Each structure stands twice: as C-alpha cells, then as structure tokens.
Amino acid sequence: MRAVATFVRAVDSLNEAVGRVAAWLTLATVLICAVVVVLRYAFSIGFIWLQELFVWTYAGVFMLGAGYTLLHEGHVRVDIFYARATRRTRAIVDLIGAFVFLLPWVVLTAWMAWPYVTASWVLGEGSAQTGGMPAVYVLKSVLLVFCTLLGLQGLALAGRSLLTLAGAPEPPSDARQERP
C-alpha cells in the first residue's frame, strides 16, 4: 500500500504543478483577447496569429487543467447521495467511477487522438490561415497530454479509494484538501 500512496502523492503533485501553469495561461488568454479586441476595434488592425494564439492558450487552460480539476473535485457530480455518504461509500463510488467511466473514456480518447496527432506531426502541420500560428501539431499534441494527466489523476483517485477501503490513512498531500 505504500507504493500506492507514493503514486497518489506523485500524481497529485504533478497535476498541482500543471494546474498552476494552466492558471497563468488563463491570465495570458484574457490579456491576448483584450489585445485582439483593442487592436481590431480601436485601430482596425488584426493579426491572425494573435487570434489563433488566443485559442491555443484557451485550449491549454482547458486541457492541461482537467487533471488539476479532478484533483480538487471540481468536475460536476450528478450523484446527489455522494455528499452525505460515508468516506467508505464515497471511495466505492470513486473507484467504480474511475474504472467504469473515466479511465475507459480517457483510453478511448487517446486511442482516437493518436492517429490525428501523429498525422499532424508527419505533415508538420501549420495553420490553415495565411499568417496563422505555425506548428499546429504542438497544439494537437495537448490532446495526448490531456489524456495522460487526466488518466493519471483517475488512477490516483482509484488508488486513494483503495487505500480508504483497505483502512490505510489517506496519503498526505499539499495539493489536495482533506475530504470531510
């Protein structure tokens, strides 16, 4: 169980660090959007690459922040009984949810994205727009990073659930708030 706890702590730390970077990308996204709007409406100037950069940073925030959001239990829950459930019942729900819903979806997404991303790298794909961002394959690669980070956090969630069910203490983590 010590290895499971170590894995959970490592994944939590990884997603915490990546989430903090994604948070700064949020600021960059807002600033880039503001610059695009001011240039367009105040000066009648437009740069395709700057408009695309806005989309790139937004995609980075969403895709890179998914594991962080799962770590901090920020994804939408439909289960109305979860909040009132015991810690053991929540662990069972989390374990089933991770292995039945989350991880198969992440694996399928990665499986389907792999040819899409590799084809983009082989082509050295750039923007379809003249003057757009080069290296679109880098943006498309974020799909695989998304699957990796979210999948790892799903495994950490399952590991945390297994530790709870085994009666082991939940691994301490600066990245995650203690559940009640």
Image (spheres, helix red, strand yellow):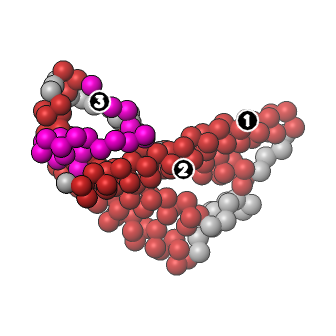
Front position among marks 1 and 2: 2
- Please name the residue that numbered disc 2 is placed on: 60
Residue 63 counted in the magenta span: no
Name the side, left or right, on which 136 lies relative to 142: right
- Please name the residue that numbered disc 3 is placed on: 179
Front position among marks 1 and 3: 3
Helix, strand or loop for disc 1: helix
Q: Residue furthest bottom?
A: 122
Please tell me which residue lies in front, 110 or 103.
103
Helix, strand or loop for disc 2: helix
Residue 177 counted in the magenta span: yes
Q: Earlier in the sequence, mark 1 or mark 2?
A: 1
Determine which quarter of the picture holds residue 75.
top left
Please tell me which residue lies in front, 61 or 153.
153
Q: Residues within 10 Å of mark 2 (few under 14, many from 20)?
A: many
What is the quadrant of the C terminus in the image? top left
Please tell me which residue lies in front, 113 or 90.
90
Name the side, left or right, on which 66 lies relative to 128: left
Q: CA distance from mark 1 to mark 3?
A: 38 Å
Residue 105 seen in the current view: no
Residue at coordinates 18% horizontally, 43% vertically from top-left? 168
Q: Which residues are magenta?
A: 159-180
Please tell me which residue lies in front, 50 or 28.
28
